[in-house]
Image (cartoon, grey):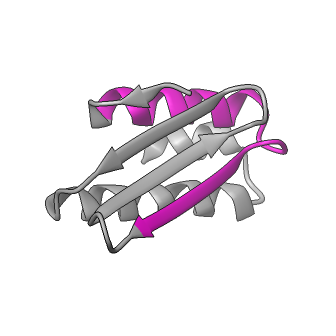
Amino acid sequence: MPHYQAWEEFTRAAEKLYLADPMKVRVVLKYRHSDGNLCIKVTDDVACLLYRTDQAQDVKKIEKFHSQLMRLMVAKESRSAAMETD
């Protein structure tokens, strides 16, 4: 399971994974209060991408990215066109 240190690399890889097969991709957010870590995992059962942070400023980035993926998952329009416009 690759752990990404750079946020931009993680988002590019996650978008690529999602656009390859949208029906198989899952997104999981997990917060561990004892460690103060927020973890976002994107997987399609073959590849698993993981980004972990303990920085408060990264929470907004993760929240924005997560909501962007959720909008794509429920959108009826072309998914690839919607991802490029955001």
Q: Is residue 68 left or right of residue 63?
A: right
Front residue of 66 and 32:
32
- Name the residue rendered at 42%, 48% in the picture: 86
- Vertical placement of 39 versus 80: above or below? below
Front residue of 36 and 44:
36
User: In the rendering, at what x and y percent does residue 53 appear?
Assistant: 28, 50
Q: Going by the picture, which residue comes out furthest to the bottom?
A: 33
User: In the rendering, at what x and y percent does residue 60 appear?
Assistant: 26, 64
The residue stretch that appears in magenta: 8-31
Q: Please identify the quadrant where the N terminus is shown.
A: top right
- Vertical placement of 18 versus 58: above or below? above
Q: Is residue 46 left or right of residue 40?
A: right
User: In the rendering, at what x and y percent does residue 83 appear?
Assistant: 54, 42
Name the quadrant containing residue 32: bottom left
- Name the residue rendered at 49%, 25% in the picture: 2
Indicate whether residue 22 is drawn in magenta: yes
- Vertical placement of 3 versus 34: above or below? above
User: In the rendering, at what x and y percent does residue 78 appear?
Assistant: 72, 44
Q: Is residue 10 left or right of residue 71?
A: left
Indicate whether residue 44 is drawn in magenta: no
Q: Going by the picture, which residue comes out furthest to the right?
A: 23
Q: Is residue 64 left or right of residue 74?
A: left
Q: How many marks?
A: 0
- Name the residue rendered at 68%, 26% in the picture: 47
Q: Going by the picture, which residue comes out furthest to the front?
A: 34
- Name the residue rendered at 68%, 44% in the picture: 79
